[in-house]
Amino acid sequence: MDLLRRNNVKVLGRGTRPLVFAHGFGCDLNAWRDVIPSFEDDHRVVLFDHVGSGGSDLSAYVSGKYASYDGYVDDVLEVLDALDLTEVAFVGHSAAANMGLLAAIRQPERFSSLVLVAPSPCFIDDGDYRGGFTREDIEGLLEVLDSNFLGWSRAMAPTIMGNDDRPELGDTLSASFCRTDPDIAREFARVVFLSDHRADVPRCRTRSLVLQTQQDMIAPVEVGHFMHRHLPDSELVLMTATGHCPHMSAPSETSEAIRRFLDR
Amino acid sequence: MPDRSGIPEETADELYDDAPVGYLTLAADGTILRGNRTLAGWLGLPDMTELLGRKLQQILTPGSRIFYETHCAPILRVEPALRQIALDLRRRDGSRLPGLVEWRRIDGPGGALLGHRFMVVDATDRRAYERELLAERERARASAEALARLNAELEARVEARTAELVQLRKMESLGQLTGGVAHDFNNLLTPIVACLDILQRRAALDARNAALVAGAAEAAERARLLVSRLLTFARRQHLEARPVDLAGLVAGLGDLVARAVGPMVDLAIEAEPGLPPARVDPNQLEMALLNLCVNARDAMSGAGPLSIRLDAVEAEAVPGAHLAPGRYLRLRVRDAGIGMAPEILSRAAEPFFTTKAPGRGTGLGLSMAEGLARQSGGALAIDSAPGQGTTVSVLLPEAEAAPAPLPVPPPEPPRPGPARTVLLVDDDALVRAGVADMLRDLGHAVAEAASGAAALDLLDGAAPDLLVTDFAMPGLDGRALVAAARQRHPRLPALLITGFAHLAASELGDLPRLAKPFSQVQLAQAVERAVASVPAAADD
């Protein structure tokens, strides 16, 4: 099996220091479009799609394997191994922040540092812990996923973006959205929003940066503090950017924060 | 242009506020800057003031908020529009308003993202239909899966039945082959037995030659037995089926079995009390039971427990045996021997298949028992696994009539009766010559014919005392010949000789018959029986 094709791996940049970007739930590698230019001069930039997302090989999606983060973590480590990367700086957004965390626990020697963008180890409220959601909320999400990927909206997908005059659409977020497989989306949503990896956070010894935005309605600021408190070797940066995707809404602030952390 | 009705033209604000869709203007981060009255009303608000400055995410249900943040917000950053998105809005009272949403990007100077025009339609009905459709689709999928499962099961069953059928066909053709070979052997044995018989009776042999002839006769007798077993497998044995008290038969055979299996085998015989009789040929069953017990002994290397159990079961209780409905007597022979692996088990009842050392078994025991059971309207079932021993069940149909006492063997016949004229018909010259010799030796005058037609020519003249004819002949067969002969001589006694002992009475009529090969004594008896079966009358 060609791992690089399976995970739609792209290697860019003119440097040697490996910098790997991993996208979150609902996105694909295009999400990093505005962040990577500032690293291409002095890094070996690696982008990839999780199996089931973006331009990955959908036929490689095996339900059992991807029913937990383990399958995704296996893939991350396989890709790093296939590219023979060590001393890796790994930037993971949201769901991929957890993948980076778990991968670094499994193979600490592989990683030099982690950048966790809008991370959350657990989205469900639990006692004093405020994840932001209840199980019923997640059921609601699954229903909305069905409506968009199984229902009438799905039939409208080709016209959703109304971009017939843009041939490059084949490699965009919109195209990913249109290609979404409803069963994969449901299962990925369950993995992301129903997993609880709080107990794993303190086990990660890799040097880490937590990037927390204002008014993130998916991963609230309390969760950013939780991560910083429990990650043994971590820094927390409270960004001025708002929302759950600072790498898209505020690419400069995001890349500057990453660069400052990596260069230290 | 003023309208003559006096109704003022609607203003753009009216159009905006009262349109049947909800409108919002959003900043790039989703902050609500403006909205229409329709949307405020849908959300249970008097007007939009309460929402201004809040974010779009705050009027979405939590699930939709996640979908918006993970799937929509990223696209809205880079694409000019996003259409036909299903999102649920949250009303003031907490209830859900299913919506269908579109965004159009508002660019600032230099193409920077300023914000979005947001439009939502009430999709309550549509989403309800959609849920129903999705549920229907799920049901259809489940049905299709169930159907596929059923299909796979059916295919597996068909495959199993096909394998069974192939085995049955194989056994059937083996049976036909065996039957044919046995028939030919019988034809060959007939003159051999006849010649040896005559030699023993008539020739003045010295001691050495007499011993040689006796050895040959004994070998011929063994060949006859072997052929008779083959015919049993081929289900072409002539069975003397009658009601038999199996418990009595098994008990009577106990001593013989015990002797056959030896002192190291611990033999136990159990019979359910009050069992009805079975319909079977008792002599053949005895032989089959003896064979099964010897097999059991060999499977235990001559030592171990061997049980013979007798009970009654309904056909449904033995599903694999393909029995006609009804009650069956079940005779089970169980050993604690090495058992059989499936591949051996599947071939166990094939004729000549044996796992015994050369010379230790013919491979006919089980096939013969199965042939007997099937020809009797029952079945034979083998239950075995390596190390688990073997149980062979012989199932025989229950007889309706009460069992007859075992017949007393007929006494040795008296010396053959008076000399008669016999017309002998057989297409096989060797057989004909042998039988003719035997008849002449008995003192009869014999005319020979090689076919039915030749025989009829002879019969156009005076009638013989007896017509002896082979059954299976090209052209006119034995039965037709007899019928044609009786057109000429209605009370002509006739005797059929046949190598196919299985032929039913319906095929032979009630004509006396004699199975090949036979001894001179048997032939003499049959001749007398045949003559006696037709009362002499002065018809010509």
Image (spheres, coloured by chain):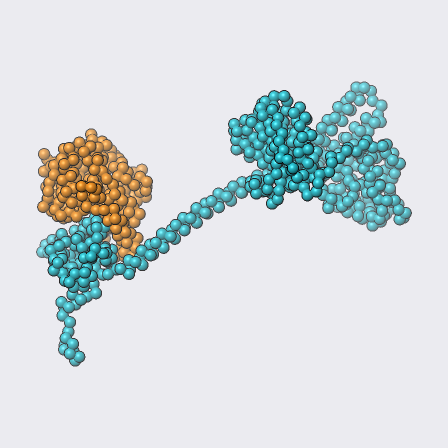
Chain colours: A orange, B cyan
Q: Is residue B358 visible?
A: no
Q: Specify the quadrant of the image occupied by residue A209.
A: top left
Q: Nearer the viewer, residue B525 or B467?
A: B525
Give the residue at x 84% y 48%: B490
Give the residue at x 79% y 36%: B432
Quadrant in which the N terminus of chain B is drawn:
bottom left
Q: Is residue B351 above or below residue B507?
A: above
Give the residue at x 20% y 54%: B60
| In the displayed structure image, the side of residue A2 where residue B75 appears, left or right | left
Q: Is residue B508 above or below residue B332?
A: below
Name the spot of residue A16 as percent of width and height, x first: 16, 34
Q: Specify the quadrant of the image occupied by residue B203.
A: top right
Number of dots carrying numbers:
0
Q: Nearer the viewer, residue B281 or B402?
A: B402
Q: Residue furthest bottom?
A: B4
Name the spot of residue A72 as percent of width and height, x first: 26, 39
Q: Specify the quadrant of the image occupied by residue A200.
A: top left
